[in-house]
Image (spheres, rainbow, N blue to C red):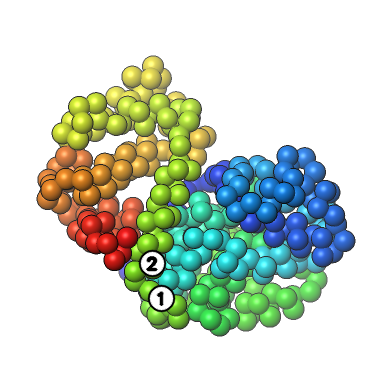
Amino acid sequence: MGTMQEAGIRDWDFPRGVASVALMVGFAREHGVPAARMLQGSGLSERQLADPDEQIDAHTELAVIRNLVRELGARPNLGLEVGRRYRITTFGIFGFACVSSPTLGEAIAFALRYLELSFTFCIPAASWRPGEFVARIHDERVPFDVRRFLVERDVAAMHQVMSDLMGRPIPLLRADFDFPAPENLGPYTEMYGLTPSFEAEHNLFALDPAILQQPLPQANEHTWAMCLAQCRDLVSRRRARTGIAAEVRERLVPRGGLDGFAVPPGIDSVAKDLNMSTRTLRRHLDAAGTSYRQLLDEVRRALAEEMLTATPLSVSDVAIRLGYAEASTFIHAFKRWTGTTPSAYRRSAITPSVR
């Protein structure tokens, strides 16, 4: 029986750094397109591209992508060509965390949980099955005018990063794309070790699951733990909720401190408090790229981490205060959120060598 893991986000509209834009501007410059034309309409300057701390929204990068496709879209396999330029170093602390992960499988699981630290527009969902690991690439919400480019780019970037992690090219078992085949299949065959299927029902790629268990060449437990903590902090800063999501989240935070959260309000109760129907609330949250369950998980996770690091409460007591009927259910949820158990998280938080 297989297992599934969805990405920690549902949509591409999340804040990001400028490294991806800088990479595409550099690629275009190599092919005769000046930076000014690439940055037209984005509001970005070349100076900003040199600042590793600069943050932009996804629509800003999308403007640059549209400029790239307009200027160089006649090049065959443009997305594939650009995607191969994305290396581990492009992703900063997110990439460093992947490099120091124990195995490729754990690096992939981490990357899915913290996907908003990447530059992707296509959202992958992973399934582990006997004999095959499959990553389905969701592009349904990607604007049609740049969809093919971004599927090509993002899949190529994912494959390139996995190959970098292993220190060698990773051949695929299969690759399917829902767009027509290009005239020249050579670059695809060279990169993926096979000829993909085109005009398929879904975009996906598959590889031998045995490779997921192989240790990564630069795996380091302490470095990994440190990078995980930094990625958690970075995500928390980027997840400043606004609009309807902020209003829902505010109602999920306990008014009476940590002891007041044993029975979290349901979505019907929250909707009534906001003077709207449950269906309308679900629709608004979906448009904001989130859900009641996701927001409840965010609040529970933040409270769980606080209780595990700042109080002597047992794991069972933390579970009760978060509204879980059984500790095992809380432990499973916490591992889904963070990739580790509550007990291991508490130990890492109080161990100086890990921090």
Total number of numbered discs in the rendering? 2
Q: Mark 2: which secondary structure?
A: helix
82 or 308: which is nearer to us?
A: 308
Tag 1 residue: 219
**In the image, residue 126 lies at what x, y percent?**
45, 63
Q: Can residue 144 be seen from the camera position used here?
A: no
Q: Residue furthest right?
A: 32
* Image position of 124 (left or right of 190): left
Q: Residue furthest top?
A: 275
Which residue is found at the position 40% from the left and 76% from the top?
219
Q: Is residue 105 above or below residue 251?
A: below
Q: CA distance from mark 1 to mark 2?
A: 8 Å
Q: Quadrant of residue 346 in the image?
A: bottom left
- Which of disc 2 and disc 1 is earlier in sequence? 1
Q: Can residue 201 be seen from the camera position used here?
A: yes
Tag 2 residue: 224
